[in-house]
Image: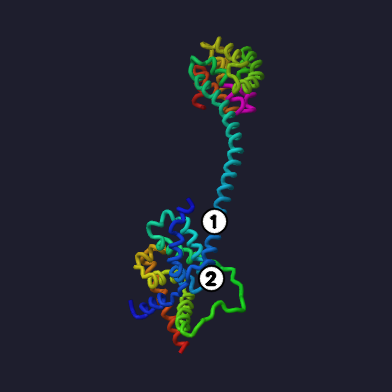
Amino acid sequence: MRQSRADGFDEFVEARWSALFHLARLLTGGDRHRAEDLLQEGLLKLWSAWPKVAGQAPEAYLRQILVRAAARSARRRWWGERPTEELPETPGSQDLAAVVEERTRLEAALALLPARQRAAVVLRYYQDLPEGQVAEVMGCPVGTARSLTSRGVAKLREALTEASESAR
Amino acid sequence: MDDFEQELARMMRDTQEHVPFGPHHHERLQALLRARRRARAALMAGGSLLLLAGVCVGLPVALAAQEHHGNRPASTPTSTPSSGPTSGPTGGPTDFPTDVPTSGGTPGAWPGTPGTPGASGTPGGSGAPTTPTHNGTSGPSGPSGTSAPTATSGPTTAPTSAPTSVSGYDPTTAPTSGPTAAAAPTSGPTATPMTFGGSGPTGTPTPFPTR
């Protein structure tokens, strides 16, 4: 019973982990620990519903869980973070530096956005969803999703422009 | 989509880091799943215990309530026939119990009312202090118990005088007892008119309107 319930779940997680982790990371504004927590929480919920959604669109289901959980978790005041003297990650080699720098810039800019705007932008530009589907995933009207996306993009434009100017 | 938006989409895709699903991810996920299973099992066990406790507490209470309730309907069906003139004999005694418990102090007023009619009130009056207690106790337990003889004795004279035994116990004193019965609602508005009205359809028409 339990084996049949988990049929395909592990394979799905192994196959899609990297992409899902990136989505979670973008949704959390670059916080990889929160992203991992978010993804694990989402996978847990997906596992509960796996017999129902396995044959349909498990990734869409999980995406919806992640987006809503990210928006909800952003309202928390404290995440149990504790200061540390060591930096969590450092670029390993020189050829990765550009990618890491770009990612850091993007994530820093995303972190400035409110959670819902960030989710709308990520769904629209990373997941490449049409506006109607963005609204459906976020559980809001299309006009709201469009407004959140455009405001998010405007803020990102400003933040990324400032960041690139300061880098020069 | 303008240039910035295209650049944004490219940045989001290109910066994806390849993170394999490692054993520690697997272990953590399995641990979470185990914890969830345990929590669900605990929740189910707690729910079952609560249900069991609810049944243990609720069942005796429900049974007691049913028992209590089962006694009350015994008076109700008999009081319904009491409105019928043919079942006046049984209606007489069974009307008492419904009144006596509800109107606690008014039984004093109620038997007083039949008591005032005088000689006929003496049986009623002698019955009155006793009949409330009889009726109060015998009504629910057995309408055909101790009060049945008094009731039957009343209505045996009563098929004709059944209304009078209630409204005044005496046809001659009925006019005087009529007003007292009409005045009785002030002392016991719910109790006495109910019984009077129920068992004395012909005797006093006034209790009916007051009822």
Prevailing SS of the magenta stretch? helix
Q: Residue furthest left?
A: B1
Q: Which residues fall within the magenta stretch?
A: B95-111
Chain letter of mark 1 equals B
Which element carries disc 2, helix, strand or loop? Answer: helix
Q: Is-magenta flag for residue B108? A: yes
Q: Decide: marks 2, 1 in contact (CB < 8 A)?
A: no
For label 1, the residue is B36
For label 2, the residue is A33
Residue drawn at 61 percent across, 16 percent down: B145
Q: Position of residue B29 (x, y in %)?
A: 52, 62
Type of amino acid at the residue the image marks with label 1: Arg
Residue drawn at 44 percent across, 62 percent down: A11
Q: Position of residue B22 (x, y in %)?
A: 51, 68
Residue A113 in view in this figure: yes
Q: Is residue A155 left or right of residue B177?
A: left
Q: Is residue A44 above or below residue B51?
A: below
Chain letter of mark 2 equals A
Q: Position of residue B100 (x, y in %)?
A: 61, 25
Q: Is residue A131 left or right of residue B133?
A: left
Label 2 crowding class (10 Å Cα cut-off): few <14, some 14-19, many 20+?
Answer: some
Closer to the camera in the image, B123 or B95: B95
Label 1 crowding class (10 Å Cα cut-off): few <14, some 14-19, many 20+?
Answer: some
Q: Is residue B141 left or right of residue A30?
A: right
Q: Position of residue A27 (x, y in %)?
A: 46, 70
Which element carries disc 1, helix, strand or loop? Answer: helix
Closer to the camera in the image, B138 or A69: A69
Q: Is residue B172 left or right of residue A159?
A: right
Residue A115 in view in this figure: no
